[in-house]
Image (tube, rainbow, N blue to C red):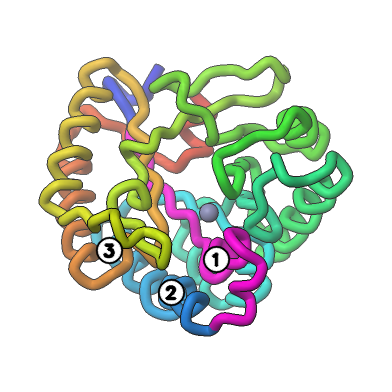
Amino acid sequence: MWPDGTRSAASFTFDFDAEEVWIGEDPANADRPGVLSQGTYGAKVAVPQILDVLRRHEVRATFFVPGRVAERYPERVADIVAAGHELAHHGYTHTSPTKLSRAEEESELVRGLEALRAFGTEITGYRSPSWDLSPHTLALLHEHGLSYSSNLMDDIRPYRLAHPRLVEVPISWILDDAAHFWFDGASWTKSIATTATVRQIWEEEFLGIRRLGGACVFTMHPQIIGRPGRLTFLDAFIGFVTGHDDVWVATTAQIASRA
Ligand SMILES: [Zn+2]
């Protein structure tokens, strides 16, 4: 399944949500600068630092970006594209498709595509703002020429979906930084994991997927993984993954192409 004699694959993906994830959680947050500033950190500080880490390791990653974030931070998105990373769809606003009518969902899809295509790069992938798909999502992706989804948790390898041109590149909560590090005003009973804990969880899962010949798709968020202490962890962890010669480190689109 994997090229050049490799036995498994890995992909580093970043959902560049900025403020939109907070507005998507609660529209009233649009008027709360303190809440929004958590997302602004992702755009202002974290993305340049993450690009630096990726450049040092010569790794191409995938950035899933809501259209509105691309419109608000065009220089950041231009930097992502100029560095050779893949740009992929993550809604126009950060709204779950399950909360939208078919017409609203199609409008989000089209506006998001327009915002991203303005950067002159091909957009082939879609990750829903919540990993949730509506009954219409796959048909809409197919109609609008997208070629892969990265939303489902039912496998460890890319596979063909019912819509003939669509491939699924599966993800998992265990490989999502938010599951371990997320904190908000409603999370006071939840503690923030240390990077040592996450390193152990991710190393075990990566080695397990490698043993089974799958694709290890990490989902990270600049505003979460881009905190200063975690950037040190990210740097070391990417080095750990790329240190395995039998693992093909690729963009999510490249992994989709192997299904
Ligand atoms: Zn997101």
Q: Which mark is residue 194?
A: none
Q: Earlier in the sequence, mark 1 or mark 3?
A: 1
Residue type marked 2: Gln
As drawn, 43 above or below 212: below
- Residue 75: percent from left, percent from top: 56, 77
Q: CA distance from mark 3 to mark 2?
A: 21 Å
Choose the circle earlier in sequence order: 2 or 1: 1
| Callout 3 touching callout 2 (CB < 8 Å) | no
Residue 167 visible in the snapshot: yes
Type of residue at label 1?
Trp
Up the image or down, 198 lies above or below 1; here it is: below
Q: Earlier in the sequence, mark 3 or mark 2?
A: 2
- Check residue 26 for magenta coloring: yes
Q: Secondary structure at mark 1?
A: helix
| Residue 49, quarter of the rendered image | bottom left
Residue where numbered disc 1 is placed: 22
**Residue identified by numbered label 3:** 53
Residue in view at x 37 percent, y 22 percent: 2
Q: Mark 2 = which residue?
A: 38
Instruction: Give the spatial CA distance, label 1 vs label 3.
Output: 26 Å
